[in-house]
Image (tube, rainbow, N blue to C red):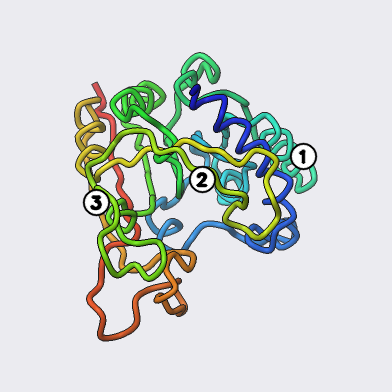
Amino acid sequence: MDYKEVNKANWDARVAIHVASDFYNVDAFKAGAQTLTPFQLEEVGDVTGRSLVHLQCHFGLDTLSLARLGARVTGLDLSPKAIDVARELAADCGIEARFVAAELYDAEEALGDTYDMVFTGMGALCWLPDLTRWARIVAALLKPGGVVYLSEFHPFADVLDDDEGATVAYDYFDTSPHVWDEPHTYTGSEVLEHTVSVQFQHPLSEVITSLAAAGLRLEYLREYDYTLFQRFKSLVSDASGYRYPEGRPRIPMMYSLRAHKDIR
């Protein structure tokens, strides 16, 4: 199975469903809403005038949110349909942005540039089989002194049962391809035209070690005890997101990190 072609078809099929969904709320974005979380906004910091590339940008809401903060943005995604929508949104909102349709491992050639910041958002790394190669590409895309900022769903939460999140059901260290056949995407009940996807689990140690091996210096790693959607039935919502109810032991559900490329 060619995971690239399978996942491209799956993500192409998601685009129209996602754009129309309440989950993404494109109308609110067009009216000026910001899609980045409070901790992402704080950790990304002042990006005014900085060149930034958002890898695996989907149809560009986070990318365009970063442009609204003053960054000079480029978004890259494997789905041409997503990139078409991103370009349309940028034009509709009067936001200057560049969007490129390409598979991540072709990013250097497809982009032909280097940046002050590489940004990667939630739910991106699970689509990549080789993080060592990913980290080398991230490093190659950075200017000397540039930074990579990553925020992700924590891999520990992915080992728990899909219902209540109460028992260990999956192998944390299993990095083999996981083939899923699911009729729906995460935004609702609309049936996908292409239902199969291939995903890859990456322990947190693999993420950090890959960046270090690529010559990037870790500035921080932060873990969060909540997530952005109801990952398990047992989670309760509050002002920040979804977490286990009071009295239940907490686990990490998201993390973020920042690393930089030395000036030489």
Badge 1 density bin: few <14, some 14–19, many ≥20, Cα 10 Å: few
Residue 99 is left or right of residue 223, and the answer is right
Q: Nearer the viewer, residue 27 or 21?
A: 21
Q: Is 3 drawn above or below residue 122 in the view shown? A: above
Which of the numbered marks, if any, corresponds to residue 221?
3
Instruction: Give the residue at x 65% y 38%.
Output: 194
Which x, y percent locates residue 115?
45, 29
Query: Quarter holding the C terminus?
Result: top left
Could you tell which of marks 1 and 2 lies nearer the N-terminus? 2
Which amino acid type is marked by label 3?
Leu
Q: Is residue 52 visible?
A: no
- Left or right of 113, for residue 86: right
Left-right relation of 211 to 80: left
The reply to whether dot 1 and dot 2 touch (C-beta < 8 Å) is no
Q: Which residue is mark 2?
A: 48
Neighbour tally class for label 2: few under 14, some 14-19, many 20 plus, Cα within 10 Å: few
- Residue 33 visible in the shown view: yes
Residue pictured at 29% horizontal, 36% vertical? 175
The amino acid marked with disc number 1 is Glu
* Residue under the point 19% across and 42% down: 205
Q: Which mark is residue 88?
A: 1
Residue 230, percent from left and from top? 47, 68
Quarter where residue 9 is shown? top right
Q: Is residue 169 above or below residue 49?
A: below
Task: For marks 1 and 2, give the CA distance.
Answer: 23 Å
Residue 40, horizontal then vertical, whole percent = 43, 56
Q: Residue furthest right?
A: 92
Q: Is label 3 in contact with label 1 (beta carbons under 8 Å)?
A: no
